[in-house]
Image (cartoon, rainbow, N blue to C red):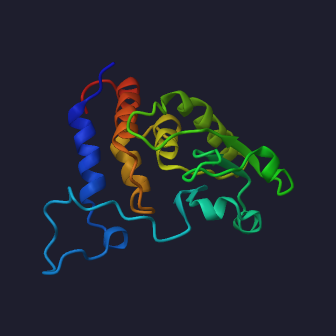
Amino acid sequence: MTYSQKLYHRVREYLITSTDDRLHGDNSSSGAAPTFWMFTLPQAPSNSYDEVYPGIFMGDMQLVRDKAHLKELGITHMVNCSQGKGPRETDTDARFYRDAGIKFHGMKAVDSPTFNMMPFFKAAVDFIDKALKSDGVSRSATIVIAYLMLKCNMNILEAVRAVRPKRKIHPNDGFIRQLCFLNRDLYGGDD
């Protein structure tokens, strides 16, 4: 299984060097634009949630457990990409959201470059598509990008550029590679 390393590096470079001050702030003491971000850790999102595409919200672990706030936002559908009981997981399921009238799709995805997230793309994207057709919302950068690629006919760079200005996203290297595979399957070629 191959993917375009050139495209992978273009996406990764865009994510690392994005100069949107709202996303990175001013990390330069001289005011000059940074030329090398390799040792800068990705910044966490500054908001609990952001609307990253019309009708699609991405949020943190605290928000997904706050059913009252979710209802205030009008969220009717939830994709939990970190389902589980571990320290970097969110222990929610369909029963948790039932009384709030929120439909649920969960996956136990590990945030590791070696974790294969591709098997989750179709089911999560179909769930998001069905939700949007009935005015719903969902979350998680990799799945949202896959949704934009599969349902909005965006290539990977267009999808990343649509989401990144709205939220500090940093899909890990393995997930970027998998999105590159998806891009290859959808559009062929190296770019």
Q: Position of residue 140 (x, y in %)?
A: 53, 49
- On the rendered structure, is 13 left or right of 187? left
Q: Residue furthest right?
A: 99
Q: How many marks?
A: 0
Up-down: is 185 above or below 133?
above
- On the rendered structure, is 45 left or right of 91? left
Q: Residue furthest bottom?
A: 30
Q: Position of residue 21 (x, y in %)?
A: 31, 73
Q: Quadrant of residue 64?
A: bottom right
- On the rendered structure, is 104 left or right of 28? right
Q: Residue furthest front?
A: 86
**Residue drawn at the location 27% of the way across and 25% of the way down:** 189
- On the rendered structure, is 141 left or right of 39? right
Quadrant of image for the N terminus: top left
Q: Position of residue 101 (x, y in %)?
A: 83, 53
In this orientation, which residue lies closer to the viewer: 154 or 181?
A: 181
**Residue drawn at the location 60% of the way across and 37% of the way down:** 124
Q: Position of residue 166 (x, y in %)?
A: 45, 63
Up-down: is 173 above or below 29?
above
Q: Quadrant of residue 183?
A: top left
